[in-house]
Amino acid sequence: MPTSYNNQRADGWQSIWIGRHRNEVDLDRYLSGAFKSEFGFDWPWQRGPEFDVAVEPIPIRLLLSSFPNLPVDEIEAFATGNGWAVASSVVLFDRLKYNCSPAGTMRGMFFLGVFPQKALQRPVERETQETETANLDFQDARAEPGTNSRRPHGTTDLMEAARAHDLMRVLALLTAGSDVALRDDRGHTALHYSVRMQVVSSAHAAEQAACVRMLVDADGSDVDPRSDTNETPLMIAARTGLQASAKALVEAGAGLAAINDAGQTAEQLARSSGHQGLADYLASNAEA
């Protein structure tokens, strides 16, 4: 375990870990157990990490491709320089600067470091962020709402707020006129972003589902927007095992028979990802 560590909540920064977990079940088990003892802190449940998993080790650049606004060249160079040309899992904490002293023991994941997410950096007049150790406070500072301006990779403030499940900010942005139908460079809408993050508690699941319902109910919203790979929000929720959010989408009329470019339905994605209960729920609703 590290002899010292420091956690600072800071906009525009992301802390990244990579490893060799090849399925979501194993990674979830590791994050819920050994991660804390190995890296010295437990994340706040309402702001759990984002992650991605590949069934086989793939180049770092490909593993990071699902996360917008990352300095991929810098991260790839650092990872390769430390012997990680390929990996099968990545964990990312948004708005967190984590530093620890090196530990000479093998860990379940390798801490790549802290990297700037330049697209999220705020003007200098923003309120100064407080440094906190061990006990993280992720109460988001509120950005000025109301614009549909684009960040790198085509993301918007509403997409970022939806990904964080920041209900107050999502409401403020929608009220101020943010367009729920806008898409990023890969065809993802704010509704896609709202189901990208794995949940790690019932409270977080309820918060995420509430965000989904808020976006579905917004003027101009489509419950089944298609990404560039013909993936709907329900498919993402099914693959990730988001029971509450998937239920909210189904109740809002999400298409259960829709297929992505790989020919898979939401039910098939849930089943192939090990979420049998969710797959059975989707199957029973498809038959209704």
Image (cartoon, rainbow, N blue to C red):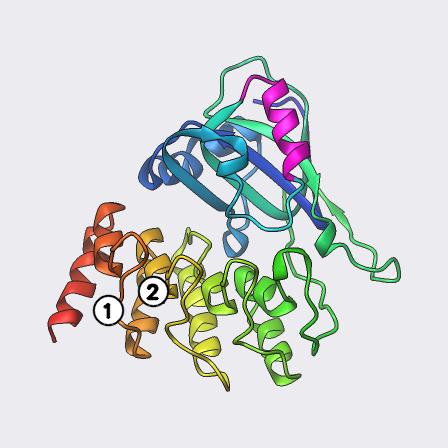
Which sits earlier in the primary sequence, circle 1 or circle 2? Answer: 2
Residue that badge 1 annotates: 256
In this rendering, position of residue 99 left or right of residue 252: right
* 80 lies above or below 26: above
Amino acid type shown at disc 2: Leu
Amino acid type shown at disc 1: Leu
**Residue visible at 13% across and 67% down in the picture:** 284
Q: Quadrant of the N terminus?
A: top right
Residue numbers of the magenta segment: 72-84
Q: Whole-Å distance between the Cαs marked 1 and 2?
A: 8 Å
Outermost residue, left direction?
A: 287
Taking the magenta stretch, the answer to whether it contains residue 78 is yes
Judged from the image, the secondary structure of the residue bearing numbered disc 2 is: helix
**Residue visible at 49% across and 21% down in the picture:** 107
Residue 101 appearing in the image = yes
* 91 lies above or below 143: above
Q: Dot 2: few (<14), some (14–19), or many (≥20) neighbours within 10 Å?
A: many
Residue that badge 2 annotates: 234
**Which dot marks residue 62?**
none
Work out whether residue 15 or residue 62 is closer to the camera in this orientation and state it: 62
Residue 10 appearing in the image = no
Residue 108 coordinates in the image, percent (x, y): 45, 25
Location of residue 253 (image quadrant): bottom left
Outermost residue, top direction?
A: 104
Magenta part mainly helix, strand or loop?
A: helix
